[in-house]
Image: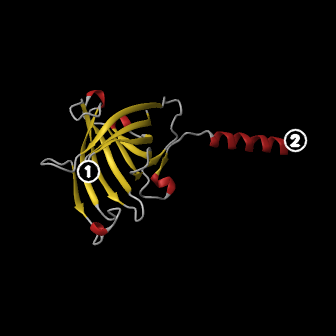
Amino acid sequence: MATSIFCGFLLLLFLSCATNPTPVNSSDQGNSYLISSRLISRATAEKQSHFRFYWHDVISGPNPTAIRVAEAPGTNTSTTGFGALIMIDDALTTGPDMKSKLVGRAQGFYASAGLDKVGLLMAMNFVFTDGKYNGSTIAILGHNEVFSAVREMPIVGGSRLFRFARGYVQARTHSLEKTGDAVVEYNIFVNHY
């Protein structure tokens, strides 16, 4: 009987410890860089939003929005432009026409990272400037194989209304001019709270 009481006590102690939502402080962990750690309620409603807009990459003319800022010694002789680094501040509009409503900017860079195929490393923030999303951002970091019909890149975060964002974007080239100017349709599928 004493054994069953002792086992019952241990089970009760185990269950009370397993469900204790007490925050852990840095002194509890012995790590000076951990400020706090706590359970997060799963009762918070996560939603998925789908946006579509058009990214205007302008490299020609008097007011380019994409500028080469660095290159490797062999970039100009490479068939893929390997080693080129381009900074961007591209318009995001509701339609493929540049005169469509401006809803934000794509700010960041892309770099030619493929030796044999044109493949870009994309690192950019979609910075919203319109309506309730004004000031919010969605961060994208991924591989963009430019000549594929559809390219998919991950969403790695966001700010303001998109804090803790995750998801993906799909890019489809709408038009590519001889000058190198491009319009790309972006469909954004973002999970956020």
Residue at the image position 79 percent from the left and 44 percent from the top: 7
Question: Which mark lies nearer to you, 2 or 1?
Answer: 1
Quadrant (top left/top right/bottom left/bottom right) for the N terminus = top right
Residue tagged 2: 1
Amino acid type at circle 1 is Gly
Secondary element at image label 2: loop
The mark found on residue 149 in the picture is none
Whether the residues at callouts 2 and 1 have beta carbons within 8 Å, the answer is: no
138 up-or-down from 66: above or below: above
Q: Residues within 10 Å of mark 1 (few under 14, many from 20)?
A: few
Residue tagged 1: 180
69 up-or-down from 18: above or below: below
159 up-or-down from 123: above or below: above
Residue at the image position 49 percent from the left and 59 percent from the top: 30
Q: Residues within 10 Å of mark 2 (few under 14, many from 20)?
A: few
Which quadrant holds residue 18? Answer: top right
Q: Earlier in the sequence, mark 2 or mark 1?
A: 2
Q: How is the image coloured?
A: secondary structure
In the foreground, 63 or 31:
63
In the foreground, 50 or 161:
50
Residue at the image position 18 percent from the left and 49 percent from the top: 64
Q: Residue 79: give x, y in percent of width and height.
A: 34, 64
Q: Residue 35: give x, y in percent of width and height.
A: 42, 50
- C-alpha separation, residue under disc 2 versus residue under disc 1: 84 Å
Amino acid type at circle 2 is Met
Quadrant (top left/top right/bottom left/bottom right) for the C terminus = top left
